[in-house]
Amino acid sequence: MNPMDGERKIIIEFCHLLEKSKVLFNGLRELPQYGHKQWQSYFGRTFDVYTKLWKFQQQHRDVLDSKYGLKRWQIGEIASKIGQLYYHFYLRTSETAYLREAFAFYQAIRARRYYTHAVKEDKCELMVKKLRYYARFIVVSLLLNKLKLVDDLIRELDNQIIEYGTTYNAEDQMEWTVVVDEVKAFLDAEPAVQVMYNDMPAPDMSNRIHPDHTPYVDRGPHMHLTLQDVIIIGSSTQQAKFSELTIDMYRILQILEKEPIGPAPQALSEDIPPHGPPPAPHSTQRGYVVGDSFRRDNPHKYLLFKPTALQCLVYLASSCNDLPLNGAILLYISADGYIPSHSRNADSITGYEAGGFITSGKLDPNRDSTRESRGQSQDRGSRGKDHYLLYPGDIYPFTRRPLFIIVESNCSGLMQNMPRHFNQPLVMLLSAQELPANLAERCHQGNLLTLFLNNPLMGFCASCELYTIEEGLLDVCETLVLDFMFQCAQLILRIRIDMNFFAFMGDEFLRTIILRYLFCECSLRMNRNFRSRSQIVHSTPPMPEELLAHSSLVSIILKISEQLGVRNHFSDVSGPGSGPI
């Protein structure tokens, strides 16, 4: 065969694979974001094409360099797409193994400086691709808690934005500056409490579920549910956010994932090209398999940033429809609430009468006063319900399935009277509706209940307005928090609590959430700074007083307060004559 014919075939095949990969990748946007079955085969085909493309450019690099003119930024673009593919698969499956693979590819792009000469190509769109790569790398690094690396990436992105604006006089330079400012605000909020290390750099800390930190309980006949789907709604308008991820969403999603087992993918050296993606992932009843390696099954999550009420209902309906036998759904809502003036004192009103949650951010909270100033009628019957709001009544049909609800809102009490029409397990953990003034000023850094659920000790410190902690003290107090969890798990088995809680206790994710919630309620009830009931979290059904004021649990909280030097903030509610605050 003529060598030139062979080279021509290589170039034609490369172009074919490159075009096919682009078409498949763009098609990912058309896949439904909900449901479990429609997207799997498409992802498999896309993985397969990118595997062939990556291996092909490795095997024929010399020909592609000399005859096709393959540039380093083009190799980087392929690697970036593979990283995006892994990240999207992580979003679909919630398996952190894929998140770490995405990180490995993004890290390799940075280490090999694939985009270094992008500005010299004199292509504005190529610089935009480079900026987007940095933004995606920051998101993945944030999700893996690599905060020191994020600091470095922010500095690099800042410099790239300046160079971008200087070279191209780009109109969207200000938009990219806003992106950097958002990340900086996010890092100001996370971590909520800084750990002070004396003689070494602060390590990356993870708040994902670790088996050694999860109290074990024997699954009795009533503990039959397993968490399958999680719907996370993040709509708080004042919170730090980045890339459609509020600080509350960021914290809650981590406690719904297990810490990955096994070594992380190796950082890829300069002289060894990164491997292509593994064989197409496929599902099993237990989880997801990639090649010969089983990936542990975390509950599947939907991350909804400022969704409309209708979108919330679509995702809920899809989860309920796909839920297997003995499966459960967790609904997490972090949103501002709206209560019409006519029902502000009607605590017993339910359904659609008392108000709802502003999930899309499109409602004017001052609309009642505006209407009154215009003389408009406030008669209930003359006004329709606002279609922007997610009402408690909207949730009623989905209580046909086992439902675990967490609400972070100034109007969380709207959910406390939800009826149990279908005799299915239903639990609600509701945030305080107001906070002491000093804590309320820090609402942009995330809500308190979610912080307790993410890291109980950090929540405890924040509730006492402690925002730094020494490394040695951290270890002592974390041991005490773990002691609380393990003792509380045993007490729950002995003290009669509502059977709705028992149904969810067999799942390690929900068990961890319940135990951390109990730590939150116990400590806030004892904290003298939280003086009114509206400043304390509560659950529906309520936890028994016998458990919340148990002497062994109260004793541990007092020990933590002594270690932190805030003992005078806390009351001992376990002694004779002591009751709940």
Image: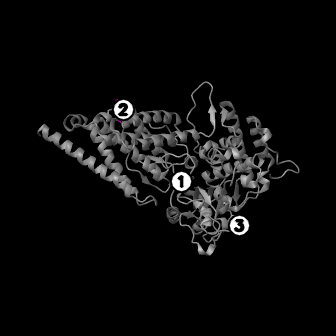
Q: Which residue is mark 1?
A: 299
Residue type at tag 3: Ala
Indicate the secondary structure of the residue bearing disc 3. Answer: loop
| Image mark for residue 206 | none
Q: Total label count?
A: 3
Q: Residues within 10 Å of mark 2 (few under 14, many from 20)?
A: some
Residue type at tag 1: Pro
Q: Is residue 542 left or right of residue 266?
A: right
Which residue is outermost to the left? 2
Which residue is outermost to the top? 199
Mark 3 touches mark 2? (CB < 8 Å) = no
Q: Which residue is mark 3?
A: 346
Which stretch did the figure color magenta?
Answer: 269-273
Q: Which residue is mark 2?
A: 113
Mark 1 touches mark 2? (CB < 8 Å) = no
Give whichever of 573, 290 is nearer the camera. 573
Which residue is outermost to the front? 374
Q: Main secondary structure of the magenta part?
A: loop
Residue type at tag 2: Arg
Give whichever of 420, 359 is nearer the camera. 359
Indicate the secondary structure of the residue bearing disc 2. Answer: loop
Q: In the rendered image, which quarter is residue 355 located in?
A: bottom right
Q: Residues within 10 Å of mark 3 (few under 14, many from 20)?
A: few
Q: Is residue 242 left or right of residue 269?
A: right
Q: Is residue 340 visible?
A: yes
Q: Which residue sits at x=59%, y=56%? A: 333
Q: Is residue 92 magenta?
A: no
Q: CA distance from mark 3 to mark 2?
A: 62 Å
Q: Is residue 524 left or right of residue 282?
A: right
